[in-house]
Image (cartoon, helix red, strand yellow):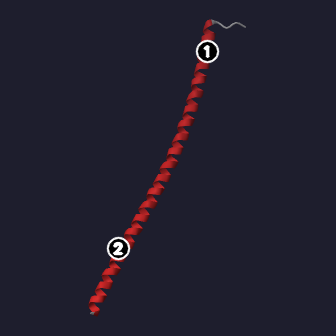
Amino acid sequence: MQLTKKATADFQLWQKVARTEEQNNSLLTVMAQRGQKRRAEETEEQRNRGLSDMAQRSQERRAEENRRTKEWLIGQTRRAT
């Protein structure tokens, strides 16, 4: 069976569209994977930032507690003398 020029052109166009669609789907898959990886990394960065903030607040609380204890001891010493 011989295809007409129009049928041949239509078939070639259909093949091109199919290839392009496959390429688009492949690109979308790659983009989705990169997005998931980026979100996972951001989540890890956010967790690390949160842990760092918690550690800093803990240090600040300990420093404040030590300062108050020291002031209290100084006050007790002054009263005793």
Amino acid carrying mark 2 in the image: Glu
Viewer-proximal residue among 25 and 77: 77
Q: Residue at x 67, y 8 (%)?
A: 3
Eyeballing the image, is 17 above or below 2?
below
Eyeballing the image, is 70 above or below 56?
below
Estimate how packed mark 2 is, as few (under 14), some (14 to 19) or many (20 or more) residues with alpha carbons within 10 Å. Answer: few
For residue 71, side relative to residue 56 (left or right): left
Viewer-proximal residue among 46 and 80: 80
Q: Secondary structure at mark 1?
A: helix
CA separation, marks 1 and 2?
Answer: 77 Å
Estimate how packed mark 1 is, as few (under 14), some (14 to 19) or many (20 or more) residues with alpha carbons within 10 Å. Answer: few
- Per the rendering, the mark at residue 12 is 1
Q: Residue at x 50, y 53 (%)?
A: 44
Amino acid carrying mark 1 in the image: Gln
The residue mark sitting in front, 1 or 2, is 2
Q: Secondary structure at mark 2?
A: helix
- Residue 68 picture quarter: bottom left
Viewer-proximal residue among 53 and 39: 53
- Residue 60 picture quarter: bottom left
> In what quadrant of the picture does the C terminus appear?
bottom left
- Per the rendering, the mark at residue 41 is none
Residue 72 lies, in percent from the top left, at: 32, 83
Eyeballing the image, is 68 above or below 47?
below
Eyeballing the image, is 47 above or below 61?
above
- Residue 1 picture quarter: top right
Q: Residue at x 44, y 56 (%)?
A: 49
Q: Which residue is mark 2?
A: 64
